Amino acid sequence: TPQFVSMKVFMPSCLVLARSLSLIKTNLYFLSRRQAPPSLKVNCARWSSIFRSSANNSEKPPQDQQEKQQDNLPFQYLDDVDQKVSDTINIFHECNTVSSYQRAQLLHEQLIQLTTIDPVRLGNAVEHALLNPTEGYYNTEFGTSALKTYRTYVYPKDSQKQQTQYPPVVAAMRTARQIDFLVKRHKSHQLEWVRHHDTNPMTTAVDNTMVDLRMETKRTFPLIILLDNLRSANNVGSIFRTADACGCAQVITAGITPHPYGSGWQKVSKTSLGADAAVSTRHFTTTQQALSSLREANENVFVVGLETTFKSVDYTRVPYPNFSSQENKTGVLIVVLGNEVTGIDTELMPLMDVLVQIPMFGSKNSLNVAACAPVVLYEILRQWGVME
């Protein structure tokens, strides 16, 4: 019957396909180690030929059934696998057989197309460093990192060749972009009037002790940021960096908020770029406990809640009490920031002295919490006159 003929063709097809997939799975181990097994392509072709022969030797069904089965037969699948394996083998072979001279030519072409760097001068600087190992890779024009990146691509070690994941042209383009970034970073660090990086500690000439110049110029104001159940460690890290920039005395975390001494500390430290270590911090189980502790410890407390409500006032129209003045140094101003989704807990809003909001002129209701913090903090500092 036509059904029997269909099963007679379909069952050998499934068996051969299963064997082919098992063979590919076994050989993927070698591909994961950047080694292309020479038997992989041959075996795939062999199983493909066996599959075709088994289908041809079977009794052919009627013409109408044959057209329906043609789409189900995985001939094209095995051809695709065979082609992908061949392409993979060719890529590994191409990456491992390109000479250093060819790599240098490819890299120079990409540097000319994508950057303004003179590849000849860069290559000469690398050759000079290789011929004079005692001088190292120090170079005032391009920087050490750019020279080492050039050397790694043009003169790779055997282990680095095995780890190559891209064809030489693609690798040259990626290397050129990386060198361009490293050279720009080196030039920005050389300019005294550009401050893209932190001041490093310096050694005094008197007692040979380390003195951090940042601590000598750092100013601290009676400003405290209170984070009410924030969920994103990246937002918390960004707020720590803002707190350090604005001279906040402390950052207090409450509830599920990630903090430097608890869950999510790795992301907090990474996002803050180390600012979490420069700003004092404490953690409380609840936000109510944090507010109660702050009111007990300080004589005057003014709490500002940043939330979009019908009761909120434009943040620029609120006169913030100046606790940084010589006449009024007994108080502290607290800025409360709420959860990214639910905002400040509604039970906490009656405890605020004022609710402020940032006006929105677009379709969205609010900004990201990490973007709101510096807006309000710098307005407070402006009113306090600390920028004059």
Image (tube, rainbow, N blue to C red):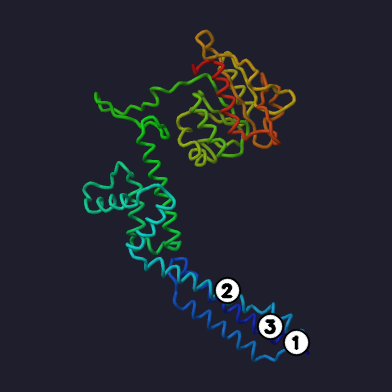
Residue at the image position 61 percent from the left and 23 percent from the top: 291
Seen from the viewer's position, the closer of residues 227 and 247 is 247
SS at mark 3 in the image? helix
What's the distance in space between the residues labelled 1 and 2, CA to CA?
27 Å
Mark before the other along the chain sequence, 2 or 3: 3
Residue at the image position 77 percent from the left and 84 percent from the top: 64
Residue at the image position 58 percent from the left and 21 percent from the top: 379
Q: Position of residue 352 (x, y in %)?
A: 67, 21
SS at mark 2 in the image? helix
Q: Position of residue 197 (x, y in %)?
A: 41, 34
Residue at the image position 44 percent from the left and 63 percent from the top: 167
List the residue tagged with mark 1: 63
Q: Does residue 371 lie above or below 74 as drawn?
A: above
Mark before the other along the chain sequence, 3 or 1: 3
List the residue tagged with mark 3: 10
The quadrant where residue 101 appears: bottom left
**Circle 1 crowding by C-alpha within 10 Å: few under 14, some 14–19, many from 20:** few
Q: Left or right: 41 with respect to 54?
A: left
Question: Dots 2 and 3: beta carbons under 8 Å?
Answer: no
Q: Position of residue 276 (x, y in %)?
A: 48, 33
**Circle 3 crowding by C-alpha within 10 Å: few under 14, some 14–19, many from 20:** some
What's the distance in space between the residues labelled 3 and 1, CA to CA?
16 Å
| Residue 135: mark in rendering | none
Q: Looking at numbered disc 3 in the image, what kind of residue is underneath it?
A: Phe
Q: Looking at numbered disc 1 in the image, what kind of residue is underneath it?
A: Gln
What's the distance in space between the residues labelled 2 and 3, CA to CA?
20 Å
Taking the view exactly as shown, the residue that stands out farthest to the top is 327
Q: Position of residue 231 (x, y in %)?
A: 61, 38
Question: Dots 1 and 2: beta carbons under 8 Å?
Answer: no
Please tell me whether mark 2 or mark 3 is closer to you in this view: 2
List the residue tagged with mark 2: 80
SS at mark 1 in the image? helix
